[in-house]
Amino acid sequence: MCGIVGYIGKQDTVPILVDGLKRLEYRGYDSAGIAVLNGEISVIRRLGKLKELESALLESTPAGFVGIGHTRWATHGKPSEENAHPHTDCTGGFAVVHNGIIENYSSLREELQAKGHTFDSETDTETIAHLVEENYKGDLLDAVKATIKQLKGSFAMAIISKHEPDRIIAARKDSPLVLGIGDGENFIASDIPAILGSTREVIFLNNDELVEVTGDGVNIFTFNDVAVDRDSFTVHWDFEAAEKRGYEDFMLKEIHEQPVAVKETIRSRFQKGKVVLETSSNLTDDMVKAISKIFIVACGTSYHAGLVGKNVIENWARIPVEVDVASEFRYRNPIINESTLVVAISQSGETADTLASLRGAKADGAKVFAISNVVGSSITREADGTVYTHAGPEIGVAATKTLVSQMAAIYVLSLYLAQVRGTLAQNEINNIIAELNELPEKMNELLKDINGIKSCAMEFSDCKSFLFLGRGIGVPVAMEGALKLKEISYIHAEGYAAGEMKHGPIALLERSVPVVVVATEGHTYEKVISNIQEVKARDAQVVAVATEGDKEIKNHADYVFYVPRTSELLSAIPAVVPLQLLAYYIAKIRGCNVDQPRNLAKSVTVE
Ligand code: M6R
């Protein structure tokens, strides 16, 4: 995730910016840069880790008391020095750092180019610098206000200008920004840890607010130009707690970031009832119409996203789908031709088996499409096109927010296929889009009340084995619930299709083996209830994930985790959240390291 830091005061700004950026390293980044005001604006950027930037600064350190810095985690444009922030306008008069996504950047870029602006990067952010240049009539604050009105999307940004060396202007919409208050100096940052080395007095900027920061103070305004008076508060967190935004672990933080991950992934992909895939997807209508078969290949949690994909694509786009674990696909000689689409799902974009599967499928003539969270990763570079998820970097080894954003990307891709092939009517597409847009808020609601999950975790933390069951879209959810529990608590767990239980796993059932059942509303709900009865008849305890308002389920299950109502195929996203939390709390009770479980790696680049 990108990080921002800014400083204005009486000290040399470079060491302060570099220290702030170092404190943001844990968020993950691919390049870094700073801009310092010293009459002109000096910009120094480097691809790679901060030590590259530091080496460049050793050769030539700009002196100055005002500056902005950034660590970039690529979303628009590959990781490179040109795409690293800060970005400047044509005149070098303005420099900007930005977190978030400017949705309308390509139309703005075209308009600006038509007016003669030249661009040096592929980023959405550079558009902001040129817009400020265009809007500047002698007052930077006014220029930024005018610019904000032209932007669609999410942003936290900080802007400096050589024309006004005594202030930084910053603004926030749907992307966090904090102000650090010092004595004769002030700070801006995307996250509290960035400024904890200098001050503990902090003001949060709210959504739709902008701020003028000088050495003497901060003046906050709403986007509607109303002045805001807000007191600072003292941060008592230590640095480590601040990195985790007060959560005990990265995994818990990332579980709570899932609504944003889904929101960011679907953002800007629906325009006026149409599903829009970015140009990097490279999937033409003719290609979509010619697809006769889809293979989804992935590993681990991404494989579960693939299973969701099979259900959704077959239902909406009516294309046959096979889902394979990549380590099998690459060696099994599947039947592939030019009308085959292979979708490789990988949050890291580096998983060796998935990459090898992609290469094999391409060599056999298939079109290969990636779903990944990392711009410029190996899989995205070799695929014919990519739908990026926008979960931000995931630090916990166990995948959580990347999974729900993969599912969100799959919904987008499936709707796109259905739209092009005409297998869903426009009103059906509209309804699904409306429901998808509601999901983030529903997930927020779900995450507000998790006490029931904690007590359930207490009850079952000593168990040696769990069974997870589901039907239809509930199968991958059950499999993911089992995988999460295995990974972080080291308890044996199996995820199974509920109808298969009687063909084997039922032999495991006894009081000490809890059975977690995904029993959300759907066309097989009654069948799931019958499976629960079979479990109860063997004396095992049942934990059900059910749809809010389901009164019947309480008659069958010992514990119920309710999730907000949504349509059956979309229910995979809310239903997986309580299972992640159950695994998390059981692991915590057992004293496990949830962020770095034993034997696991975040990115599996070996076979
Ligand atoms: O980076 P990828 O999505 O390709 O990774 C695939 C698996 O290695 C990954 O999902 C793994 O199973 C995680 N430990 C899941 O929590």
Image (tube, rainbow, N blue to C red):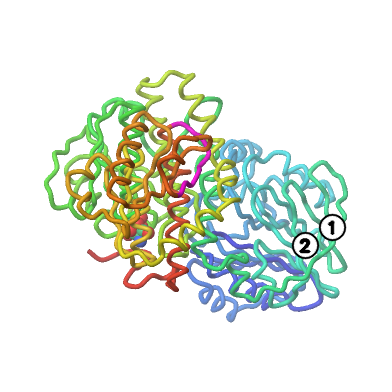
Residue 158 is left or right of residue 519, and the answer is: right
Q: Secondary structure at mark 1?
A: loop
**For marks 1 and 2 on the same chain, the one whose residue lies earlier in the sequence:** 2
User: Which residue matches tag 2?
Assistant: 203
Task: Check the image and report above or below for 197 versus 371.
Answer: below
Q: Is residue 378 visible?
A: no
Residue 395 is left or right of residue 222, and the answer is: left
Residue 482's quadrant in the figure?
A: bottom left
563 in the magenta segment: yes
Q: Is mark 1 within 8 Å of ligand 1?
A: no
Residue 134's quadrant in the figure?
A: top right
Separation of residues labelled 1 and 2 (CA atoms): 7 Å
**What number of labels is visible?**
2
- The quarter of the image holding the N terminus is bottom right
Mark 2: which amino acid? Answer: Ile
Task: Check the image and report above or below for 467 versus 27.
Answer: above
Residue 240's quadrant in the figure?
A: bottom right
The label on residue 230 is: 1
- The answer to whether the residues at label 1 and label 2 have Cβ atoms under 8 Å apart is yes
User: What span is in magenta?
Assistant: 559-567
Task: Check the image and report above or below for 50 versus 106.
Answer: below
The label on residue 154 is: none
Q: Secondary structure at mark 2?
A: strand
Task: Give the camera-side residue of 470 and 369.
Answer: 470
212 in the magenta segment: no
Mark 2 is surrounded, within 10 Å at the Cα level, by few (under 14), some (14 to 19) or many (20 or more) other residues, namely: many
Mark 1: which amino acid? Answer: Arg
